[in-house]
Amino acid sequence: AQRVTQPEKLLSVFKGAPVELKCNYSYSGSPELFWYVQYSRQRLQLLLRHISRESIKGFTADLNKGETSFHLKKPFAQEEDSAMYYCALGGTNAGKSTFGDGTTLTVKP
Amino acid sequence: DVKVTQSSRYLVKRTGEKVFLECVQDMDHENMFWYRQDPGLGLRLIYFSYDVKMKEKGDIPEGYSVSREKKERFSLILESASTNQTSMYLCASSWGTGWYTGELFFGEGSRLTVL
């Protein structure tokens, strides 16, 4: 069975500090991993996906198959980054995507 | 831009009532999903559908049913609402064929309160 673990429910950093949101997964096949973000009063939306290997809003995430991790990083956090972040595992598991429990990031001024 | 529209943003129902949550997407996506979002529990999949009239149970299907009569529309039905079904319900759609699911596009959510 596939599983996604986000160990931190809450994460608080100061503006300008680096931030890392952790995500670990378990999956026997070839994983396809995503980070979704939900800003206050907005719909859940894709932030980035591992296969695109791009930086969105200064965030990056690298798939580490050896450690089965897909941590989300940003070198300098901004107040507008405050949101709920979900790591998700998609791909070929009978059409299902599995989400972690989410991490609420608060960036303090 | 993909648009996933959920018919009701807020609903208040009484225990035992039948509840319909409607979702429509306009991008001709094959796959549609209903998730439940609860604090500290993340998103849990209730049901999904990969084609018209096809449905598959997710992780928490008990107390729910779904209907997909047209490709663009996916309905979630609570036959007899209970207080433990008070939650935020999210509809999503994605391109996909067979067993594959890519990026999910979400609706704004329907917040259901069962009294």
Image (spheres, helix red, strand yellow):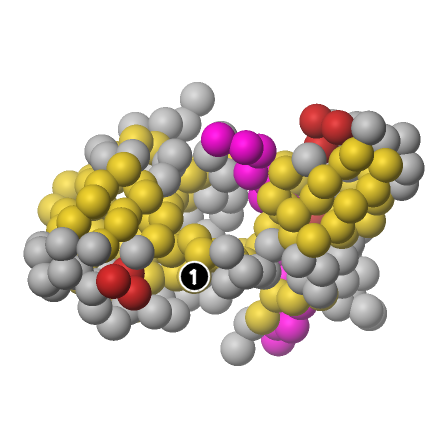
- Which is more toward the observer, B90 or B47? B90
In the image, residue A3 lies at what x, y percent? 58, 70
Q: Is residue B89 above or below residue B48?
A: above
Q: Residue at x 9, y 56 (%)?
A: B17
> Which residue lies most toward the front here?
B115
Displayed quadrant of residue A30: bottom right
**Residue shown at 63% from the left, 61% from the top:** A31
User: Residue A78 at x, y = what percent?
Assistant: 79, 28
Of all chains, the one bearing label 1 is B
Query: What is the magenta range?
Result: A25-41
**Frontmost residue, A55 versus B53:** A55
Q: In which quadrant is the C terminus of chain A drawn?
A: top right
Name the residue tied to disc 1. Answer: B44
Can residue B64 be seen from the camera position used here? Answer: yes
Q: What residue appears at the point 54 percent right and 32 percent down from the top-left corner?
A: A40
Q: Using a 10 Å C-alpha cutoff, classify the residue at mark 1 as few (fewer than 14 neighbours), some (14 to 19) or many (20 or more).
A: many
Q: Locate residue B53, reporting x and y percent.
A: 15, 54
Residue B91 visible in the picture = no
Up-down relation of residue B27 to residue B11 (above or below): above
Q: Report if residue B49 lies within the magenta region.
A: no
A89 vs B12, left or right, is right
Q: Is residue A49 above or below residue B101?
A: above
Could you say where residue A62 lies in the image, as x and y percent from the top left? 80, 50
**In this rendering, would B51 be left or right of A22?**
left
B19 relative position to A4: left or right: left
